[in-house]
Amino acid sequence: MQNNSDQESRIILLDDHLISKIAAGEVIERPASVIKELTENSIDAGATQITVEVEDGGKKLMRITDNGTGMTKKEAGLALMRHATSKIKDESDLSSIHTLGFRGEALASIVSVSRFSLKTKTKDIPAGTEITQDGAEERTIKEIGIPNGTTITVKDIFFNTPARQKYLKSSSTELANIIDVITSYTLIYPQIHFKLISNASTLFTSPKTHDMQANIATIYGRDVAENMLKLSYDTSAIKIAGYISKPSLTRAGKRQQSIYVNKRHIKNKLITRALYDAYHTYLPIGRHPVFIISLDIDPKIIDVNVHPAKTEIRIEKENNLYEAVYSAVKSSLEKNELIPEVKDNTTQKKIPVPYTRSTQPYTPQKTNYIPTKTPSYSPKIAPRQLMIKETEKDITFQKLPDMQIISQITNSYIIAESEDSMYMIDQHAAHERINYEKLKKTKGNKPNESQTLLNPKIIELSQKDAAILNEKKELLKVTGFDIEPYSDNSFSVRAIPVILGKQYSESNITDVINDIIEAARITDIDNLKDSIIKMIACKASIKAGERLTDKQMLDILKELDTCDAPYTCPHGRPTIIEMTMKEIEKRFRRT
């Protein structure tokens, strides 16, 4: 019988290269992860100029050049080893992290999954150092002549880990993630000149400044910057600065939101909740503010070592943090003038609309009804009596139940009745279904009918959004948009889908574009087109709270009856609900 001590051990020690590749799976998820780690190193090195170059969304090449302090030959060699760092020296330093990078894993992880090159030089040494290494292959080191600072080149990310490589997204998606990283640091480090180059073309360059609002204008556009409120809050434990948007400036999504703790870009649900709670009734339902909020907190009460990518933190005394953020935002909202500026919209008057609301004040018909006593309340909306011709009251439908319109309540729902039921029709959901099917009936790639604008609208986007929109502009033509680059990150909207005419406004066009950019992450072309059509149908539809004429209510029901799927909106919500007489009598306990 073989002795257990002679058996081969099932537990082995992994070699350093395999350990680094495993660590890379935690730290390096995609090209943007590489850019994040290397940018943080450049910032920590005191750089005032950082240039990022990428090809094929970073999948083919990433290069970061900075004018920071650089490294000696010995330091450069050590920097590529696992857990080598200049940021901490002993356990006590973990409770007082003042730098962005400190783990000492990033460079070793990047080297293990790429074709890597590092060039670096300090100002005190005449010659620089170049180190090259392809994955696990042997490293080469030589002296070279270069300017002070560091240049790191990363080629063919995950070339030796195909299982990871196949999960990378399209070049445009990976580039969008890289733009997110660079713009997030541009906002909080305005004193650094950032430059981003993609496929030899400069996407954006940020001027070196000490004014965060100037960088907001560079990244998000002048209109956004002009509608931001400054934050200022200072206690012995927490200092808060930054900018939040006026309630008149909101977005349909949360892309233009950034939180920093000690200048580290993070995600934190507590801070976000405090901010939204402070806005409370200032925000319309379904709308989101733009904000760049920076907190300076004693490093001893926060733990930045929670997540390998350092995107999450743990904070002591969360109640104090919540109160500080809430107070800072609420104070800024309360002390500033928040009345929206009325802008000249005369050009919009020339745009045809599919429905026309009556400009005459509503006057109810007189009746002989005399109440037996004075009502104890004053209704806000006068009761409506329809002015529909007798021949039009009863409509024969093909799909919907035959019904007679009674009225509209809360300017949101059409009320109708049949012999044995009452119906409530959601005017927005119904009109959204009508518009959606009109747009869907476009055959092949034939564009939907477009409406040329007499005065093209110029929209200004962030660098990331501009890159995505530029790639999808041909697809937009299929849905009726004509959008062309104007300058830098601006686009000229020359035509819009005719169906969008009624709801046309500069803010609505911007919302539609923002929604389309958000949906652009959908890679399947048919699903993307369908998603865009749903957005346009929603924006073009009559809204809840909009008073309708009698004819408009009739037209909605007639058109809804012609739809292939009249009973739900494109998002699956019901367009019509029924309450039978039997159910009504049951509710009144008559049965």
Image (cartoon, rainbow, N blue to C red):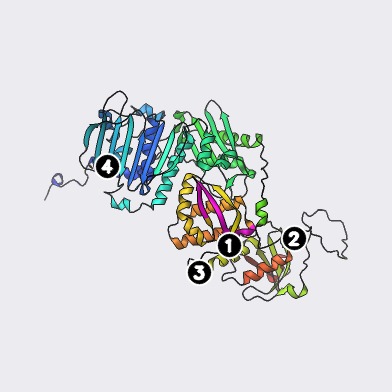
- How far apart marks 2 and 4 lie (CA) works out to 72 Å
Q: Could you tell me residue 312's position as x and y percent?
A: 44, 39
Say whether residue 493 is magenta: yes
Residues shaded magenta:
483-502
Does residue 367 appear to the left or right of 51 in the view shown? Answer: right
Q: First in sequence: mark 4 or mark 1?
A: 4
Judge whether residue 147 can be spotted in this image: yes
Label number found at residue 358: 2
Kind of residue at disc 2: Ser
What kind of element bears circle 4?
Answer: helix
What kind of element bears circle 3?
Answer: loop
- Circle 1 residue: 573
Residues at discs 4 and 1 in contact (Cβ within 8 Å): no
Kind of residue at disc 1: Arg
Q: Could you tell me residue 360's position as x and y percent?
A: 78, 59
Crowding at label 3, few (<14), some or many (≥20) Cα neighbours within 10 Å? few
Kind of residue at disc 3: Lys
As drawn, the residue found furthest toward the left would be 1
Kind of residue at disc 4: Ile
Q: First in sequence: mark 2 or mark 4?
A: 4
